């Protein structure tokens, strides 16, 4: 790692759980970052979180964070329906933006970001693809060490019991797909290094109008399929399986890796079901949020690190649009229409 000229000074928009439990601790641990300011709807709430984490400046509005000339980058830690609006406001204030996922409710919503300063780094915050093992996985797949990846499957779920959670509200972008499916769709695209051509999906909605369970098939063409299930009403699961021409690859604790034990990629090259020939790649325990904010700060400073711009976010949002259209219509939906 190159010598750091100066850490990137960050502001946080929103005193949410993701900020308190993940982003601010990651910023604090990173030598490339300095958490400088936090803004919330009340000055008291912002001050309480700032004091908890040793942040110097607390503001009673998001606008005050954006007006702070010392803030270089912001993390948008707001409910889903506010992401595009505040990403645009931050960019207009000359700030780099790392926005909590999903970046937008629909692909069309991202039209609001057209014309922003191209010198600004703006990215959707999928921390998982900043894990060293995910980066290594993509290198293995891109090099076709075991032939072409042909199928991807994933389960991602947990039991949501908090009825006051914003994820219970459809108008706030609630539901399993926006919360979890955006991860699994992004991962399928990441694995294949391509965009899905069409989608078939089914959802199970609750009385409040959000999807509690969604199953999806993505067709990437050339014989490549992805299948995944996401749910807010099942036991905790987080698996990834990839079948290549000559290997079966799996990632235990795929989306939320251990912070205390090594993380692994298991590769089985056995040619028949009666046997196994598994070798394991091991990676040190890590805080993936620290990796995320560090790499984003390094990108701001001109370092060559994994970086995904808003074209990637738009492609992921187009899949979401197609998923919901398919679930409504009960048919395959072309993704390119979005």
Image: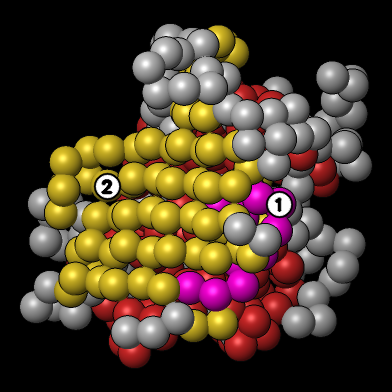
On screen, residue 250 above or below 126: above
Find disc 1 in the rendering and name its residue: 193
Q: CA distance from mark 2 to mark 1?
A: 24 Å
Q: Which residues are magenta?
A: 188-199
58 or 62, which lies in front? 62
Viewer-nearest residue: 222 or 294: 222
Q: Is residue 236 visible?
A: yes
- Residue 172 location (% of width, % of height): 33, 74
Q: Which residue is mark 2?
A: 157
**Split into 4 quadrants, where in the image is the C terminus?**
bottom right
User: Within the image, what quadrant is residue 19 found in?
Assistant: top left
Q: Residue at x 52, y 29 (%)?
A: 248
Instruction: Answer with the quarter of the image where residue 142 lies.
Output: top right
x, y percent for residue 295:
72, 36
Relative to 136, residue 193 above or below: below
Of the two numbered discs 2 and 1 in the rendering, the one whose residue sits closer to the viewer:
1
Residue placed at 50% from the left, 46% from the top? 152
Q: How many marks?
A: 2
From the top left corner, tell me how far across and down residue 99 is, in percent: 58, 58
Mark 2 closeness class: few <14, some 14–19, many ≥20 residues within 10 Å? many
Element type where label 2 sits in the image:
strand
Determine whether label 2 and label 1 are within 8 Å by CB: no
* Res. 67 visible in picture: no
In the drawing, does residue 144 fall left or right of residue 259? Answer: right
**Residue 119 in magenta?**
no
Q: Quadrant of the N terminus?
A: top right
The residue lying toward the viewer, choosing from 12 and 161, is 161
Residue at 39% over, 28% down = 253
The label on residue 69 is none
For marks 2 and 1 on the same chain, the one whose residue lies earlier in the sequence: 2
Q: Residues within 10 Å of mark 1 (few under 14, many from 20)?
A: some
């Amino acid at each position: 790692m190159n010598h750091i000229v100066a850490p990137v000074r960050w502001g946080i928009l929103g005193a949410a759980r993701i900020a308190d439990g993940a982003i601010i601790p990651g910023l604090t641990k990173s030598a490339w970052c300095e958490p400088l300011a936090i803004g919330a709807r009340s000055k008291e709430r912002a001050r309480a979180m700032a004091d908890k984490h040793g942040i110097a400046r607390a503001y009673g509005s998001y606008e005050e964070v954006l007006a702070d000339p010392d803030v270089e980058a912001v993390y948008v830690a707001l409910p889903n329906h506010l992401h595009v609006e505040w990403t645009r406001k931050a960019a207009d204030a000359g700030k780099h933006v790392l926005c909590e996922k999903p970046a937008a409710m629909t692909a069309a919503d991202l039209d609001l970001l057209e014309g922003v300063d191209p010198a600004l780094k703006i990215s959707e915050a999928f921390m998982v693809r900043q894990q060293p093992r995910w980066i290594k996985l993509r290198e293995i797949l891109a090099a076709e060490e075991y032939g072409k990846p042909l199928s991807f499957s994933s389960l991602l779920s947990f039991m949501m019991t908090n009825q006051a959670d914003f994820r219970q509200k459809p108008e706030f972008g609630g539901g399993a797909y926006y919360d979890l499916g955006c991860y699994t769709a992004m991962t399928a695209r990441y694995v294949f290094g391509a965009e899905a051509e069409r989608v078939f999906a089914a959802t199970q909605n609750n009385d409040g109008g959000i999807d509690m369970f969604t199953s999806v098939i993505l067709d990437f063409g050339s014989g490549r399929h992805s299948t995944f299930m996401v749910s807010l009403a099942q036991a905790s699961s987080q698996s990834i399986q990839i079948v290549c021409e000559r290997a079966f690859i799996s990632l235990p604790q795929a989306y939320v890796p251990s912070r205390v034990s090594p993380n692994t990629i298991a590769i089985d090259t056995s040619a028949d079901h009666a046997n196994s020939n598994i070798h394991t790649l091991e990676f040190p325990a890590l805080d993936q949020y620290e990796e995320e904010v560090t790499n984003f700060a390094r990108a701001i400073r001109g370092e060559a690190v994994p970086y995904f711009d808003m074209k990637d976010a738009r492609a992921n949002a187009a899949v979401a649009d197609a998923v919901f259209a398919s679930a409504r219509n009960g048919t395959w939906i072309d993704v390119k229409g979005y």
